[in-house]
Image (cartoon, coloured by chain):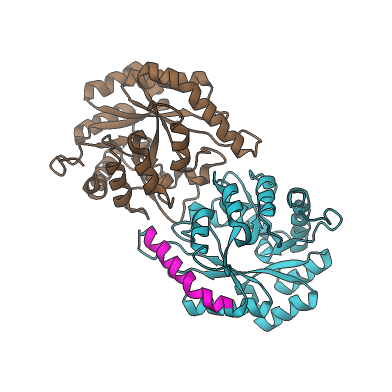
Chain colours: A brown, B cyan
Amino acid sequence: MTTDAPARPLTRFSLNQRTCAHWPLADAIAGCAAAGVPAIGLWREPVAEVGLDTAASLVADAGLRVSSLCRGGFFTGGNTHADNVAALDEAAALGADVLVLVPGGLPEGSRDIAGARALIEDGIAALVGPARERGVKLAIEPMHPMFAADRGAVSTLGQALDMAERHDETVGVVVDTFHLWWDPDVLAQIARAGRRILSYQVSDWITPLPADSLLSRGLPGDGHIDFGPITAAVAAAGYSGDVEVEVFNADVWARPGAEVLAEVAARHVELVVPHL
Amino acid sequence: MTTDAPARPLTRFSLNQRTCAHWPLADAIAGCAAAGVPAIGLWREPVAEVGLDTAASLVADAGLRVSSLCRGGFFTGGNTHADNVAALDEAAALGADVLVLVPGGLPEGSRDIAGARALIEDGIAALVGPARERGVKLAIEPMHPMFAADRGAVSTLGQALDMAERHDETVGVVVDTFHLWWDPDVLAQIARAGRRILSYQVSDWITPLPADSLLSRGLPGDGHIDFGPITAAVAAAGYSGDVEVEVFNADVWARPGAEVLAEVAARHVELVVPHL
């Protein structure tokens, strides 16, 4: 429960930069600062484009928090362990407390989902030491089951917590409304998660599902998700970090970044802040 | 475990007629009989097109079982109770032991998924008496979470069983590989289901997900699902009924019905029969 809302309603708001995928990083950082947005969620690829040191200076000079770095993981074939350790180095350099882990789907040619999940658990276990050394936490992202084959075979918050709880609090979870809203057990699992919640991300589920399922998210308020109960559960679990708006949507990406930022900030104030 | 496979490998095979959506009902029935396929899963709309009595005569004269009738349900706005009782009458007239219930998604304009689920439970409860009177069982179909908003808000087998177990064995569940394969708990829930399994339907999960998510199923073997563990679990739970192949896919629909039937029967023999 924040005590300063609504006087300072953007206190815990963060723009995940993929919401404005075509906004250059320097412009997005300047845009957040100009709009009074205190935090930004960064992605490795656009950070690499400007250079890690430059990116770190830009966010520091703008006085922004880096709410998370996306993304490590892909334990079933996309990333090597060294790639993921490099991602931890980047998170530390950027001042991000959290590296988001997209688990990865089935290995190429495999139908063994239990085996994929075992690979994911092994990959996480190998990262715990390097993460602890760098002071960065690992946030497992359970993903919508429609991504189980090709992107993330961790499909429920409960399953992500089963994996996280094998370790100390270096390992936690992302609660993302788009991925989890349908789960009949989601509120109970959020309560169970408690301090393991390392990131709270919001976007909406829209219908009809857009043709490209990877770009099928809606701005909060444009779809079917009730943000009240999930947000209240996240707050009740003790989460006091930033709330990232993360929307992958080609129509949103086609709009000017500053315009999108203003709109998602307004949605945050309307739909999320009353429940924090 | 069937003792007559592979000598009579199609003993428990059923063609769900939506796999060959453009095959006229009389032709599909004749095609099944000619191919030695002993059962067919029917849909209300094509049955209504030829007339209920005609459809019942066609399947009886061909000596086919009707493994299920699709579909009642839509308790959150699409169907009235009277519609669903009519579906039960049709199932009884066709000699189908099972009416498949597609639960329905969020009511128009609603974001209350818990409320939608309560409407579904109420709708099922109201149908138990009429189903029992007609000797037809009600099979709740848990649907892939990507359909939670607009088609079926029962999202896991565990949730469907929670609903079914409030009633006697008039109420059970559909186990459909496409909807459930991703669930980390699916094998345990199949074991729990036991005699509540009223229908076993197979189709595959293919990637990239086709643009129309409703038509995104693949022929068994074309995608990412391992049919062995799920089929073995269904058999171990005591299910001795038909195995329906149910594929909604525009490319499959464009092919001649008899050709598709031959192919799915071969896939059944290859991928399902060894595990029954």
SS majority, magenta = helix
Residue sitting nearer the eye, A118 or A83: A118
Query: In the rendered view, does A20 fall on the left or right side of B238?
Result: left
Residue A35's place in the image compared with B80, above or below, is: above
Residue A228, x across and y down, in percent: 29, 51
Query: In the rendered view, does B64 fall on the left or right side of A248?
Result: right
Query: In the rendered view, does B192 fall on the left or right side of B3?
Result: left
Residue A109 counted in the magenta span: no
In which quarter of the view is residue A89 placed?
A: top left
Q: Which residues are magenta?
A: B114-132
Number of numbered discs on residues: 0
Name the residue: 33% across, 25% down: A97
Name the residue: 63% across, 56% down: B249
Residue A30, x across and y down, in percent: 24, 29
Q: Residue furthest left?
A: A7
In which quarter of the view is residue A14 placed?
A: top left
Name the residue: 22% across, 25% down: A62
Residue B274, x across and y down, in percent: 77, 49
Residue sitting nearer the eye, A231 or A33: A231
Residue sitting nearer the eye, A103 or A170: A170
Residue A199, x across and y down, in percent: 34, 35
Q: Is residue A194 visible?
A: yes
Query: In the rendered view, does B243 fall on the left or right side of A188?
Result: right
Q: Residue furthest bottom?
A: B53
Name the residue: 35% across, 63% down: B109
Residue B131 counted in the magenta span: yes
Q: Residue furthest right?
A: B7
Q: Is residue A84 visible?
A: no
Residue B33's place in the image compared with A173, above or below, is: below
